[in-house]
Amino acid sequence: MLLADTRLSAPGRPTRPAVSTAPEPPAQWHRVLTLLADVSLFIGTREVWTQAATHRPAVAAVISVCYASVLVCGVLALVVRGRRSLARVDLCVLVTGLTLALCAFVLFHRGSDESVLTAQAARDLVAGHGIYGRPWPWLFGGHGIALTPTVTGGYDYTYGYPPLAPLLTAPFLWLGHGGLPAIVVSTGALLVGTVVLWWLLPAPWRSAATMTCLGFSMIPMYGRLGYPAILALALLVPVVVRWPRIGRGGRLGPAGVAQAACLGAACAAQQLPWFLAPFLLAGIYAVRRGELGGRAAGLVVLRLAGVATTVWLLINAYFVVSQPVAWLKGIALPLIQGAVLHGQGLVGVSLYLTDGSDRLDWYGYASLLLLAGLLALFVLFVRRLGPAATVLPWLAFWLATRSQDGYYLMMTPLWLAAVVTAPASEFAGAWQPFTRRLAGPHRRPARIAAAVVLLSPALLSAALAATGSPPLRLEVTSVRHDARALSRLSLRVTNTDDDALTPHFTLTRGQGMYPYFSVLRGPATLPAHTTATYELRPPGGTYALPKPGQKIRLRVFTSSPQTLSSRYVTLPSA
């Protein structure tokens, strides 16, 4: 035996290492995530390629190369042996996604009302004019740009967001007319935000950033439409990643100061961060109080809020001084403009399932009450709800009068950042008020009771809004038309409400909002419990007759109080 050992270790014959040098294999879920991110890039790409093949052959060639990259990355995601190799595949998937986003931008950059308003605000800013309270109706004439109708019978032609987007758009005005400069800013912000999120996430999770930000063709579309919310999203990414660690040890440090500055800048870009900020600040206070105590935690949150507020004020300072009243009304415009009902939330009950409601204001009350109730629940049960801080605020919009799905979709990358970097373990030691009362032997009934008490006002308000009755009874008495279009519409309208109402009329097909009709005959204000005849003229003089089987809905909005009365009408078919 000794001889055998001696032979194995004899000089001139190297021994094999006991530990293998083979690369460490990646986890199977990492392969699956990389593959899903890769597959998500297929969605919407054919449409872009089809357009490019006709108008931009060079772009079509680049997209074809991207197709090859997606296919190769799909193979590599399944066969590479090491973690580092799979990380390189993740990088290739990211680069492919960025390239496809740029190709789509080259082809589709007509923009929307958001982009043209932002670009016009930047032009007026450069010209030395104020950007708030200035209507620009000519931006919406004949360009296919959507209007925002209000319950007052008009449209909102003004800029209604904080000023960071126009400030960043101003250097790009040389690119051209329309909304292109604003689209460059929003699309660029999305690409930068994607790279930042990809870099900040742990390596195995990085492909999830590519999939969420660039896959599915959702968020890049909002970037190409020039939404200021995309700029806000990009600024919130570094704030949300590992947000429960902000102020750890009682110090913000350079990283915490940078996160606070980004939070202030995000709030100066668009209003959606306003709804997220209270949840983040409450969560940071709870986590830091569990670690440091109440006084130290309060100081951390004060410093964080102080830096964010300072940055926000610096960005807004010029407008606060030059046009304070118009600036204040402008940044609050989405909350006070009185836009008509729209979206995929509870308002669909009044829009599509019933004939309207005389209590539309209660949708807004329900939304605010739900936001307050969710914030209170978050504070009470932060150890359980802490990981959901980036999702909870958007529940309130489901009850709002404007419940568009974009409010949820555009912020989904923040959901990913939170689930990966702010898990439940970060909140295990967080401070919670009333711990003894809510954690005793009867904790489940106590928690249910707390949730019922805090959420009931919102649910009751929503029920009041949805169960309201239409205040106007509508009857079509005559229709003037030719073979293709309607030119006059006569109605008998009865006000069953106790208040005098000022009606504004339109016809709608599906979910869209057709421009308001002009009232040629009939009282501007209809007194309570009276009946009057109205003669209406379509905008532009004619309204195209529907196709056979297409439903037409007559809708009547009033502003004070906010009400909706509607009914299906039968018009001659074209």
Image: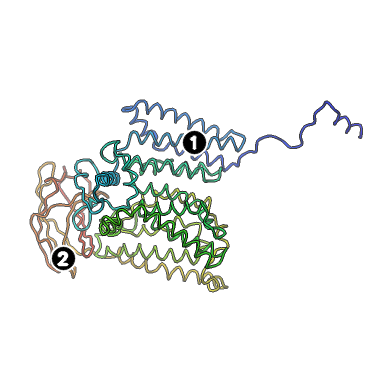
The image shows residue 277, relative to residue 100, as above or below, that is: below
Tag 1 residue? 93
Amino acid type at image mark 2 = Asn
Where is residue 200? Give x, y as percent. 52, 45
Q: Is residue 313 above or below residue 442?
A: above
Is there CB contact under 8 Å for labels 1 and 2? Answer: no
Of residues 480 and 64, the one drawn nearer to the viewer in this rendering: 64
State the residue at coordinates (13%, 45%).
540
**Residue 308 coordinates in the image, percent (x, y):** 42, 56
Q: Please identify, in this view, whether the residue under mark 1 or under mark 2 is nearer the observer.
A: 1
- Residue at image x 13%, y 56%? 476
Q: Earlier in the sequence, mark 1 or mark 2?
A: 1
* Quarter occupied by the C terminus: top left
* Residue at image mark 2: 495
Q: Is residue 142 left or right of residue 387?
A: left
Describe the element under mark 2 as helix, strand or loop.
strand
Q: Position of residue 504 (x, y in %)?
A: 17, 57
- Where residue 264 is drawn, which disc sits there? none
Residue type (three-letter) at the residue carrying disc 1:
Val
